[in-house]
Image (tube, rainbow, N blue to C red):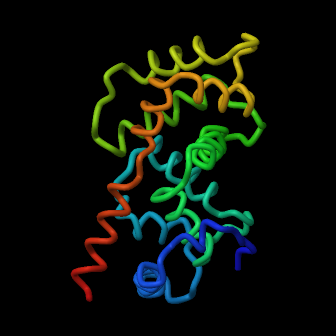
């Protein structure tokens, strides 16, 4: 089981936590979610290889103790981040999500892969191509011009650019998936 403790778990109301727990235990009676179950839980089927890689990276960022499973506390932490996380928390998660190879930096190819995957999963085309968006991000916030974004460059750059912050937040908004699950929970009650 995950060893995650923090105030984000406390933020969920008792009733809501109980509903999430019932949903979690109904879908995952073992108390642990594998990557395959994660995809089922969020209704993610028939994904392209690129989208599948994105979802796998997302799963790994939610697997806080890197044991290959999400337990209920990790699940609640993920939901809390999506539903109630502040800008700093979300930017930290976005950075982890974009840093596919876990090098501590985001390169242009990693960013491009994630943006393409988001487009494919959401089915909503962006206002600009994934390539143009990745180039725009690097042009704006790669302050030292080394072709990689450190955590500090990423967070500072996004926080200082309202349009970029809004765009990233909208592109990574997972609330539609959470709302779908909440709707399923209400119909089963």
What residue sits 74% from the left and 66% below the top? 65
Residue 120, by quadrant, is: top left
Whether residue 178 sits left or right of residue 131 in the image: it is left
Image quadrant in which you'd find residue 31 = bottom right
Q: Is residue 97 above or below residue 187?
A: above
State which quarter of the image contains the C terminus: bottom left
Please state the total of marks drawn on the protein image: 0
> What residue is at 47 percent from the left and 41 percent from the top?
50
- Depth check: give the residue in front, 36 or 179: 179
Residue 151, compared with residue 72, is above or below; it is above
Q: Position of residue 173 (x, y in %)?
A: 41, 47
- In front: 26, or 152? 152
Q: Position of residue 41 (x, y in %)?
A: 41, 70
Q: Position of residue 77 (x, y in %)?
A: 59, 66
Percent x, y of residue 139: 58, 11
Relative to 147, is 179 above or below? Answer: below
Q: What residue appears at the point 58 percent right and 50 percent down from the top-left corner?
A: 57
Q: Which residue occupies 60% across, 41% down?
A: 91
Q: Up-down: is 64 above or below 141?
A: below
Instruction: List the single residue furthest toward the left.
Output: 187
Quadrant containing the N terminus is: bottom right
């Amino acid at each position: 089981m995950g060893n995650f403790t923090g105030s984000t778990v406390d933020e969920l109301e008792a009733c809501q936590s109980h509903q999430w727990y019932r949903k979690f235990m109904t879908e995952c009676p073992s108390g642990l979610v594998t990557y395959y179950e994660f995809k089922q839980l969020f209704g993610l089927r028939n994904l392209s290889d690129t989208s599948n890689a994105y979802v796998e990276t997302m799963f790994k960022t939610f697997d806080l103790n890197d044991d290959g499973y999400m337990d209920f506390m990790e699940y609640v932490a993920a939901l809390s981040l999506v539903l109630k996380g502040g800008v700093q928390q979300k930017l930290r998660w976005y950075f982890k999500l974009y840093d596919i190879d876990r090098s501590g930096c985001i390169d242009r190819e990693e960013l491009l892969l994630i943006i393409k995957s988001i487009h494919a999963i959401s089915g909503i085309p962006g206002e600009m191509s994934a390539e143009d968006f990745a180039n725009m991000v690097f042009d704006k916030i790669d302050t030292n011009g080394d072709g990689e974004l450190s955590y500090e460059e990423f967070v500072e750059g996004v926080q200082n650019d309202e349009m970029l912050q809004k765009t990233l937040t909208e592109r990574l908004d997972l609330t539609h998936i959470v709302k779908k699950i909440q709707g399923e929970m209400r119909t089963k009650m």
